[in-house]
Image (cartoon, helix red, strand yellow):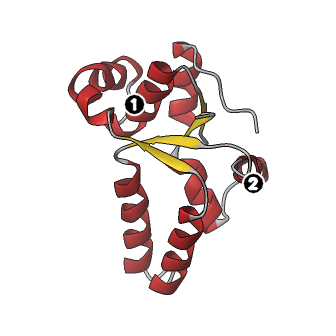
C-alpha cells in the first residue's frame, strides 16, 4: 500500500465541490491512484454509502450518478483493511479521545500509524491530529 485514503478526498471526486486547493489536491490524489494503491479502514464502505444515500435522499444526486461513481471506485486500487475492527475499542478509541476526533476519523489515523503510511485527507480536524501524531499527509 502506498497511502491511507480518507473519505473526505473520495467525496470531492464525487461532488466536485470545495475550495480550489481542495479540489486540486483531490484530483492529484486520484491521478496518483493510477500507479498506487490506497488502504482504507473497514468502515470506509459504510461512509461512502452513507454520503451517497443522504445526497440521494436530499435529491442532490440521482441513484444512477451514485452507481456510476461506485463503478469508477471499483476500477481503482482501494484495499480494505479488515483488521481495523480489532483496533476499534482500543487504539482507535484512544486516538479519538486524545485528538477529539470521531471514531471514523480516528480509524484512518490509527491505520496510517499502524501501517506507517501517509494519509490523504481534506478533513481539517484529522489533518491537525495527523500532524500531532507524526503522520505525514500524502503528497500527491
Q: Is residue 106 above or below residue 90?
A: below
Up-down relation of residue 121 to residue 15 (above or below): above
User: Label 2's element?
Assistant: helix
Displayed quadrant of residue 15: bottom right
C-alpha gap between disc 2 and disc 1: 24 Å
The spot of residue 107 in percent (x, y) is 38, 33
Secondary structure, mark 1, is: helix
**Left or right placement of residue 88 versus residue 58 in this view:** left
Q: Residue at x 31, y 20 (%)?
A: 91
Residue 38's spot in the image, x, y percent? 57, 42
Position of the N terminus by quadrant: top right
Residue 46 occupies quadrant: bottom left
Q: Earlier in the sequence, mark 2 or mark 1?
A: 2
Comparing 61 with 58, the one in front is 61
Looking at the picture, does residue 41 appear above or below residue 49? above
Which residue bears the numbered disc 2? Answer: 27
Amino acid at each position: 500500500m502506498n497511502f491511507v485514503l480518507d473519505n473526505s478526498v473520495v467525496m470531492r471526486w464525487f461532488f466536485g465541490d470545495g475550495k480550489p486547493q481542495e479540489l486540486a489536491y483531490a484530483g492529484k490524489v486520484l491521478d496518483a491512484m493510477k500507479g498506487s494503491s490506497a488502504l482504507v479502514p473497514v468502515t470506509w464502505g459504510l461512509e461512502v454509502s452513507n454520503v451517497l444515500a443522504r445526497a440521494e435522499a436530499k435529491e442532490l444526486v440521482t441513484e444512477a450518478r451514485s452507481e456510476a461513481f461506485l463503478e469508477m471506485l471499483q476500477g481503482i486500487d482501494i484495499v480494505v483493511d479488515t483488521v481495523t475492527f480489532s483496533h476499534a475499542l482500543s487504539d482507535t478509541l484512544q486516538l479519538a479521545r486524545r485528538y477529539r476526533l470521531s471514531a471514523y476519523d480516528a480509524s484512518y489515523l490509527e491505520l496510517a500509524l499502524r501501517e506507517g503510511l501517509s494519509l490523504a485527507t481534506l478533513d481539517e480536524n484529522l489533518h491537525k491530529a495527523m500532524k500531532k501524531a507524526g503522520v505525514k499527509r500524502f503528497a500527491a
